[in-house]
Image (cartoon, helix red, strand yellow):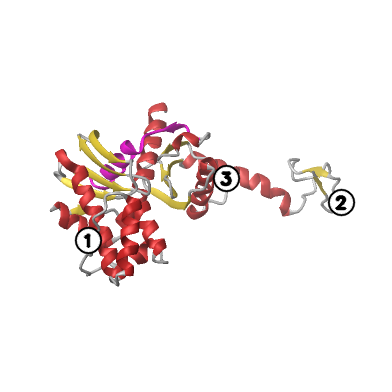
């Protein structure tokens, strides 16, 4: 591609910004060099790593600077193409950070159930390890992590900063964020508003153990004139009871962190605390805990290789 500048002959975009007679061309010719210089300055002064958590409903990303400070967080709905979802989140991270130049992350770690579908990831790490690592970074004394995601719910026991044991419910949607989302759709609202309906309400018991049967039971309760707000409270209480049963033999001990998308609901946290009899630490943005852990693993990878 060529460009004209006054008396200058057509020159390449990458030609020197002056002609053979030493005359300076327009400032536009300096822009590519300016971008190149600034880009080099940025890449040499600091570097960034990224963690991408591909969940069943939402793909989350965290961008970390080399000093482990969070530079940006972003999320997008998970589509059928996990690689594309991860790419869109990565683009959103740079945009939120305000970095106009396309500086690639020094390392990228993918986690979540769609982690193996990200071809540009430098490494993949299980969501168990990433949630544990992210929670430990935010709460250094954490011993137990309770995560309620869209596809599963899990209780993780940490010892010395490492995953010692865990239990997971990934066989049935009941007790997961997907169940709440389905019921919220039935109520023609979103998850945040649905959880808000439950605040301060007496729960209407949901007895079915299967997500499909539970939804049928909810429809029956509505037909019998039960208040939607009481049903919403009953749904959250049923999830808390499932988490309590899931924890089983290693009932939460020590400092406990509640993470995952459903942890954004204060009412869900209150009900879960009541059911478990423990105080829960909830990150400011609990849905990014896994992505934060992945980014920390990416930062560790860079430091090990340097």
Q: Residues within 10 Å of mark 1 (few under 14, many from 20)?
A: some
Q: Which residue is drawn at 42% across and 50% down?
A: 71
Query: Please, is residue 72 above or below residue 294 in the view?
Result: below
Quarter of the C terminus within the rendering: top left
Q: Position of residue 232 (x, y in %)?
A: 29, 64
Identify the disc placed on residue 172. none
Label 3: which residue? 102
Q: Give the range drawn in magenta.
A: 121-140
Q: Mark 2 falls on what kind of element?
A: loop
Task: Give the quadrant of residue 214.
Answer: bottom left
Judge from the rendering whether residue 197 lies leftward or rightward of residue 277; answer left or right: right
Magenta run includes residue 125:
yes
**Disc 1 and disc 3: Cα gap in Å?**
53 Å
Residue extending farthest top = 305
Can residue 143 be seen in this snapshot?
no
Percent from the top left, x then y, of residue 283? 29, 53
**Is 130 in front, or is 39?**
130
Say whether residue 130 is visible.
yes
Q: Are marks 1 and 3 in contact (CB under 8 Å)?
A: no
In the rendered image, which residue does mark 1 sit on?
Answer: 205
């Amino acid at each position: 591609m060529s460009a004209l500048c006054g008396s200058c002959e057509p020159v390449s975009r990458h030609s020197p910004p002056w002609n053979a007679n030493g005359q300076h061309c327009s400032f536009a010719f300096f822009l590519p060099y300016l971008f190149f210089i600034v880009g080099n300055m940025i890449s040499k002064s600091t570097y960034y790593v990224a963690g991408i958590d591909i969940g069943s409903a939402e793909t989350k990303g965290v961008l970390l600077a080399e000093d482990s400070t969070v530079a940006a967080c972003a999320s997008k709905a998970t589509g059928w193409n996990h690689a594309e979802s991860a790419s869109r989140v990565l683009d959103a991270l740079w945009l939120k950070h305000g970095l106009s130049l396309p500086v690639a992350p020094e390392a990228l770690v993918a986690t979540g159930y769609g982690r193996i579908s990200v071809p540009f990831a430098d490494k993949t790490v299980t969501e168990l390890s990433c949630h544990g690592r992210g929670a430990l970074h935010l709460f250094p004394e954490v011993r137990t992590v309770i995560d309620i995601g869209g596809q599963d719910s899990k209780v993780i026991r940490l010892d010395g900063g490492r995953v010692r044991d865990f239990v997971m419910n990934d066989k049935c949607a009941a007790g997961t964020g997907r169940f709440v989302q389905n019921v919220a759709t039935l109520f023609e609202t979103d998850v945040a508003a649905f959880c808000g309906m439950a605040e301060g309400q007496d729960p209407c018991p949901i007895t079915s153990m299967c997500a499909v049967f539970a939804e049928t039971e909810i429809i029956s309760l509505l037909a019998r004139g039960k208040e939607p707000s009481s049903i919403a409270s009953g749904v959250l209480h049923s999830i808390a009871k499932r988490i309590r049963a899931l924890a089983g033999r290693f009932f939460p001990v020590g400092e406990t962190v509640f993470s995952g998308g459903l942890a954004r609901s204060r009412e869900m946290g209150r009900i879960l605390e009541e059911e478990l009899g423990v105080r829960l630490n909830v990150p400011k943005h609990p849905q990014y805990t896994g992505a934060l852990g992945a980014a920390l693993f990416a930062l560790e990878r860079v430091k090990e290789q340097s």
